[in-house]
Image (cartoon, rainbow, N blue to C red):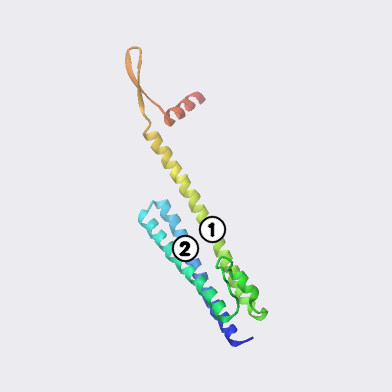
Amino acid sequence: MEKKVHDAIRHIEILCQEKLITYQKLLDVFRKERKAVIKADMTALWESSREKQDLANQIQAMRLRIADEARESGLAVFEDMKAYSLKSLVSVVPNEEKAVLMNLSMALGHVKRKISAVSRENRVFLEESLKTIEDLVRIITTSCVREERYGRETYTRQGAYAQRMTVMRGEV
């Protein structure tokens, strides 16, 4: 194997290690975001949003640098970046050089799956929290309706609160 390809593979390995570290930082940001949602800390939520965008930009830049390195070394040419993946790059690397890149590819996949799971948990938690707040606002803002019974004016609540009270009275 020629030195140019060998050096390119080493450089790609270093870039992949940096990419893995960046993905791990992104996972930490998603975990911090969960804590910020629980605390309703809007400043922290805005900060995590900015951090996620910065890390996503860094990951995209590393992805392009890896593809450029593969192209410049003659290892692989990716005309369309949508077709590029680390797995496709590993498939064209000589067998004696594959082990490290395969391990990095698996580690990246593992961290990406963790990020996806934490992101999904955050989204579900946020949706449930917003539903609870919506229910509380609906209860608080239910309208009072004026009724006249036996010559006296009374006020009754309408809406979700009244429906719940009716159900509760029916159960007793």
The residue lying furthest to the front in this view is 79
Dot 1, how many residues are within 10 Å of its Cα: few (below 14), some (14-19), or many (20+)? Answer: some
| Residue at the spot 45% in from the left edge and 66% down from the top edge | 57
Give residue 148's quadrant in the image: top left
Asked if residue 79 is positioned above or below residue 156 in the image, the reply reads below
Dot 2, how many residues are within 10 Å of its Cα: few (below 14), some (14-19), or many (20+)? Answer: some
Q: Secondary structure at mark 1?
A: helix
Asked if residue 163 is positioned above or below residue 71 in the image, the reply reads above
Asked if residue 17 is positioned above or below residue 112 in the image, the reply reads below
The kind of residue on which mark 1 rests is: Ser
Nearer to us in this view, 38 or 96: 96
| Residue at the spot 50% in from the left edge and 56% down from the top edge | 119
The kind of residue on which mark 2 rests is: Asp
Give residue 76's quadrant in the image: bottom right
The residue lying furthest to the right in this view is 95
As measured in the structure, the alpha-carbon distance from the residue carrying label 1 to the one carrying label 2 is 12 Å
Give residue 83's quadrant in the image: bottom right
Task: Identify the mark at residue 4; answer none if there is no mark.
Answer: none
| Residue at the spot 46% in from the left edge and 30% down from the top edge | 164
Percent of width and height locating residue 66: 53, 74
| Residue at the spot 36% in from the left edge and 53% down from the top edge | 42
Can you see residue 40? yes
Q: Which residue is mark 2?
A: 28
Q: Which residue is mark 1?
A: 116
